[in-house]
Image (spheres, rainbow, N blue to C red):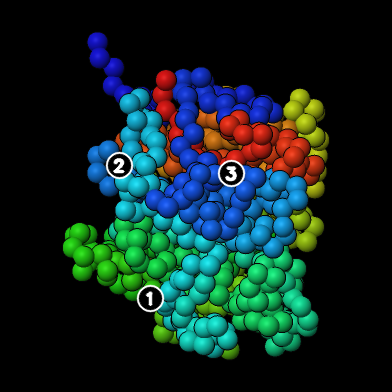
Amino acid sequence: GHRGPKKVGTTEFTSVAPNRKDDVVNAPEFTHDVVIRWGDPVTARAPRFNAYKQTPEAQAQQFGYNNDYVGLIPLDGRRALLSVNHEYTDPELMFPAGMDELTKKKVEMAAHGLAVVAIEKGRKKGSWHTVDPRRSRYNRRVTASTPHQVDGPAAGHPMLRTKADPRGRTILGTFANCSGGTTPWGTTLHGEENFHGYFDASGSLDSTQSAAYARYGINGKGKGWKDVDERFDLTKAPNEPNRFGWVVELDPLDPSAPPVKHTMLGRLKHEGCNVTIAEDGRVVAYTGDDEKGEYIYKFVSRDRYRRDRSPHSRRHNKALLSAGTLYVGKFTGDGTADGLHDGTGTWIPLTSDRKSYVPGMSVAEVLIHTRVAADKVGPTKMDRPEDIEPNPVNGKVYCALTNNSDRGKKFTTDEANPLGTSMVRESLGAPLTAKSGNRNGYVLEITEKGRKTATSFTWDLMLICGDPAAQETYFAGFPKEQVSPISCPDNVAFDAEGNLWISTDGNVLGSNDGLFRVPTEGPERGRVQQFLTVPFGAETCGPLVSPDQLSVFTAVQHPGETDDATFEKPTSTWPHTDAFPRPSVIVSYAK
Ligand code: FEO
Ligand code: CA
Ligand code: CA
Ligand code: CA
């Protein structure tokens, strides 16, 4: 008889064993293709990639470095757009010896940002490949120099003004774009994360900003971009760092629309941002601030989502993230006598678009110095909140708390951040040994009270990650001998069944990083299974399950990133098309 297509949410697969291969290893029931690599053409004018003759002009037309978030915008039954983040660069892995230093900086600036790439379905069910850029009117690159609009209550504020932009409403570039989200109105959101590390100083720092600089880790140690553009020199452009650390909204369907920086969502090290539509039509967004001891944020829009597809309604929807209320999360435990790490919580209001709830700070000040504002209202210091996303099937919200080596030392333990010690492996096959801090991370589950716009919730740690042989680990009560080891959850996604997909970064159990599927409901809740592993030195990004559940997209970020790798002596050559590694987006599908 005819068998239906294998949907990744319901198909049984054999878990991939931990390994140290310089390859993508799929579950044996699946295979994968490379969709697009660093340097592949994005725009119609893009030259062929030549690693030995790199120019900023070429790179600005080609796929950037270190792909992270992957969004998918369907065009029709056969075609779609990938909207991809290029978070950062690894100069030691990108450039051949002898390249001019200034040219390298310019290439790196062009290798950051975003890409929109048209793809179409391949002959094999679930496979996808790129459309010839000359046949796509959507393909586009956004780099560290592309003009962005600023909107929301802080747009135009004096703290956002610079010599080059006296109105404080046009910002050149986006970078450090880590994870993101796709909106129901067909745009993509891109978190500006570790923006602090891009600003040098030729002289002294502006003393009026030193407290805020310190709170964000802005210390004048950048990447030498000031030699290309003086706006990266804090001494000459002290307000420039205030123009980064935002959530960027890109409209892949309108190539002429500049990306928008939404000040209403606050300025912090946004891992990403994901939205859902509440019962009353308002938009609820979640975002995590990825640094040790930082906070989880929620936003509720003032206006309501319009479902119809008219251009007028789409314009309305694209303004939903411009006005509303921003909250920060407080997590209270109910005690560990019940054997669970769980409790209740509240979303503490920081500011609306019109009224600040933080004494002594204006609306714009709360939004520009969000960390400083949040410190004043007593939220819970979490173990590096990474991706946070509502599950479209059960409505609960899932956040990856990747790790925190300082938990138990600089940060005291609490029920939501319980581990001051954890079990790790020095290398694959080595015994488990104890190390201070939370090393393997958690997955936090939030259940809003009644409505999605609620200001109170219950929570639990659905997963306490690590090797299932370690006593501290917890897999939602599922039998531990049946789960895959998992360490350092980073990005999350869902399939249409409501299974959670988790990608990892920084595995401390001796194996390469990978991608995992775990049911969130039913008898298999907590059954963590490894779906794939990524090559040596790589971080697993994306991930994205297509709505028809036939394809799983993974961004393989920084293959070969180790302490001793160089372009001439790489420790990875994946995807093995050149002598050096190339970060790439892959698609996995059933054999
Ligand atoms: Fe760029 Fe939080 O990982
Ligand atoms: Ca409890
Ligand atoms: Ca990440
Ligand atoms: Ca990470």
| The quadrant where residue 283 appears | bottom left
Which is more toward the observer, 514 or 31? 31
Residue 216, placed above or below residue 255: below
Q: Is mark 3 within 8 Å of ligand 1?
A: no
Indicate the secondary structure of the residue bearing disc 3: loop
| The quadrant where residue 572 appears | top right
Using a 10 Å C-alpha cutoff, classify the residue at mark 1 as few (fewer than 14 neighbours), some (14 to 19) or many (20 or more).
many
Q: Earlier in the sequence, mark 1 or mark 2?
A: 2
Q: Residue at x 27, y 69 (%)?
A: 315
Q: Which mark is residue 323?
A: 1
How many angstroms separate mark 3 from mark 1 (CA)? 45 Å
Q: Residue 459: x and y, percent? A: 51, 53
Instruction: Give the residue type that dot 2 points to.
Output: Arg
Give the residue number, with chain letter if any, for mark 2.
79
Using a 10 Å C-alpha cutoff, classify the residue at mark 3 as few (fewer than 14 neighbours), some (14 to 19) or many (20 or more).
few
Q: Quadrant of the C terminus?
A: top left
Instruction: Give the residue type that dot 3 points to.
Output: Asn
Indicate the secondary structure of the residue bearing disc 1: loop
Instruction: Give the residue type that dot 1 points to.
Output: Ala
Indicate the secondary structure of the residue bearing disc 2: strand
Residue 393, placed above or below residue 250: above
Give the residue number, with chain letter if any, for mark 3.
50
